[in-house]
Image (cartoon, grey):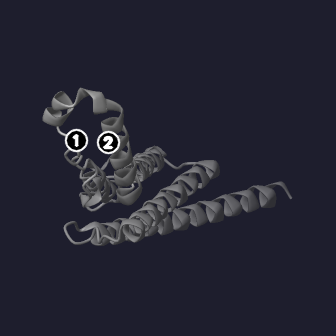
């Protein structure tokens, strides 16, 4: 005797399992700052402490020299730009990953018995697929902007493809079930009208 689908344990091949694996890959990317070195060590000051102590009357001049050095470093290496941009990209990717799992889990929890439940599940599946694309666009932006290849050390693309394929299969299955439900409802209504006529 077969076990009803809603009572079966989740398969390791289902969309949620693969999406969690995909989210782990994305999280590893952001934890590693996409392989970029964000906190660059500041160069040694041009004016040493020994010189400052030896010539205290030149303090203002030394301060101007160090201020100029800081300005040159900031403009040439764009340190602050890198930091804020990476922080924004990391936050976006983290949020998109969380939303991806949220939509899949929400869709998975709907035990479709009525038309509106099928529609809700399909809507959540669409949002999950959309989150995959949002993640993909953000990763593409990071790769282009920083001229790096994030696929070199992670199986990001393969996992994304697997996750997307499973989400589309799951959605097609839900749509088929919904169409079958609509057909049954139409037949049932037709039978009721036939009995009253």
The Cα atoms of the two marked residues, 2 and 1, are separated by 7 Å
Q: Name the residue under label 2.
A: 66
Q: Position of residue 25 (x, y in %)?
A: 26, 57
**Mark number displayed over residue 138:** none
Q: Quadrant of the N terminus?
A: bottom left
Q: Residue at 37% of width from left, 59% of height from top? A: 76
Q: Position of residue 61 (x, y in %)?
A: 34, 38
Mark 1 Cα within 10 Å, few/some/many (few <14, many 20+)? few
**Label total for image:** 2
**In the structure shown, which secondary structural element does the residue marked by tag 2 occupy?**
helix
Report if residue 132 is visible in the image.
yes
Q: Residue at 38% of width from left, 47% of height from top? A: 68
**In the structure shown, which secondary structural element does the residue marked by tag 1 occupy?**
loop
Foreground residue among 184 and 70: 70
Quarter of the image for residue 149 reads: bottom left
Q: Mark 1 points at which residue?
A: 47
Foreground residue among 184 and 5: 5
Q: Position of residue 167 (x, y in %)?
A: 42, 64
């Amino acid at each position: 005797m077969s076990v009803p689908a809603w009572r079966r344990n989740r398969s390791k091949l289902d969309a949620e399992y693969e999406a969690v694996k995909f989210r782990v890959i994305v999280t590893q990317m952001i934890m590693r700052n996409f392989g970029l070195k964000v906190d660059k060590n500041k160069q040694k000051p041009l004016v040493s402490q020994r010189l400052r102590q030896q010539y205290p009357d030149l303090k203002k001049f030394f301060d101007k020299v160090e201020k100029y050095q800081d300005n040159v470093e900031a403009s040439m290496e764009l340190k602050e730009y890198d930091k804020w941009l990476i922080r924004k990209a990391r936050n976006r990717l983290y949020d998109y990953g969380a939303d991806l799992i949220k939509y899949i889990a929400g869709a998975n929890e709907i035990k479709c018995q009525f038309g509106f439940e099928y529609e809700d599940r399909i809507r959540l599946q669409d949002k999950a697929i959309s989150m995959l694309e949002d993640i993909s666009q953000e990763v593409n932006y990071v790769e282009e902007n920083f001229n790096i290849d994030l696929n070199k050390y992670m199986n990001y693309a393969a996992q994304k493809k697997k996750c997307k394929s499973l989400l589309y299969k799951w959605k097609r299955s839900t749509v088929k079930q919904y169409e079958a439900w609509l057909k049954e409802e139409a037949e049932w209504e037709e039978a009721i009208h036939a009995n009253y006529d």
